């Protein structure tokens, strides 16, 4: 089973699940989103938002594919590009963070670590761009709300998802807490492994380094 991660572009935008491809919950403020839904222009509004964000800021999403099939995605941007962010009771997002808006794994591929793979892809991208953290608004009552709340909450990932991939709550709320993931924490597994290897090699003499390893030895991840 092959898995790969690619950037969200205007071409790969078409691989989002159909409801998400048409959704502008995050991309527009509540009034504009309602107006777009009424006029039936949500797909065009979504494309326009992605195009503008790519042009002005850069990569704003990742898609995961399993054996060539779209299996999940995540979208993110600076809070200034996400009008809906100011409508949450736990806003605003911290000045040193990008906002992770939507994260979704196709049910058929759930439980395979794709959520963590997507978040780590975002972390690598943002670290290269000098951003210190990712923040997100989570839904603490996913699947428990009434019909109207359920429609809105469907665009907000469950709190449990964020906690499972390393986020911590920075502003509690009974429905929409704000959570945060320090990027140095998200990528620390790599530096920890590198440090362990350096310590191991540094403790070995040149003679030991040159000595052939036994055929039965192995280096595990």
Image: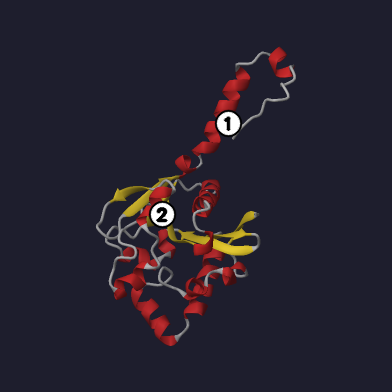
Percent x, y for residue 2? 65, 54
Q: State the residue at coordinates (47%, 59%).
A: 76
- Residue 62 lies in quadrant: bottom right
Q: Is residue 130 above or below residue 77?
A: above
Asked whether the viewer can see residue 96, the reply is no
Asked whether the viewer can see residue 3, the reply is yes
Name the residue tied to disc 1: 194
Decide if residue 141 is on the left or right side of residue 164: left
Q: Is residue 83 above or below residue 122?
A: below
Q: State the residue at coordinates (62%, 70%).
A: 11
Q: Nearer the viewer, residue 111 or 102?
A: 111
Residues packed near mark 2 inside 10 Å, few (<14), some (14 to 19) or many (20 plus) = some
Name the residue tied to disc 2: 161
- Residue 10 lies in quadrant: bottom right
Secondary structure under badge 1? helix
Where the N terminus falls, by quadrant?
A: bottom right
Where the C terminus falls, by quadrant?
A: top right
Nearer the N terminus, badge 1 or badge 2? 2
């Amino acid at each position: 089973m092959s898995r790969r991660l690619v950037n969200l572009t205007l071409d790969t935008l078409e691989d989002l699940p159909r409801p998400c491809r048409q959704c502008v919950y995050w991309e527009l403020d509540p009034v504009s989103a309602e107006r777009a839904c009424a006029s039936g222009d949500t797909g065009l509004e979504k494309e326009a938002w992605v195009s503008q964000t790519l042009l002005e800021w850069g990569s704003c999403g990742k898609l995961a594919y399993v054996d060539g099939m779209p299996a999940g995605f995540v979208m993110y941007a600076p809070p200034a590009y996400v009008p809906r962010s100011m409508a949450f009771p736990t806003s605003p997002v911290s000045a040193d963070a990008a906002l992770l808006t939507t994260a979704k794994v196709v049910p058929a591929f759930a439980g395979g670590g794709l959520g963590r793979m997507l978040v780590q892809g975002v972390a690598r991208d943002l670290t290269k761009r000098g951003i210190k953290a990712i923040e997100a608004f989570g839904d603490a009552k996913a699947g428990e709300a009434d019909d109207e709340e359920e429609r809105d909450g469907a665009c907000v990932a469950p709190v449990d998802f964020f906690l499972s991939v390393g986020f911590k709550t920075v502003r509690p709320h009974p429905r929409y807490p704000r959570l945060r993931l320090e990027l140095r924490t998200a990528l620390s597994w790599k530096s920890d492994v590198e440090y362990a290897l350096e310590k191991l090699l540094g403790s070995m003499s040149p003679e030991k380094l040159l000595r052939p390893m036994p055929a039965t030895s192995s280096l595990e991840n």
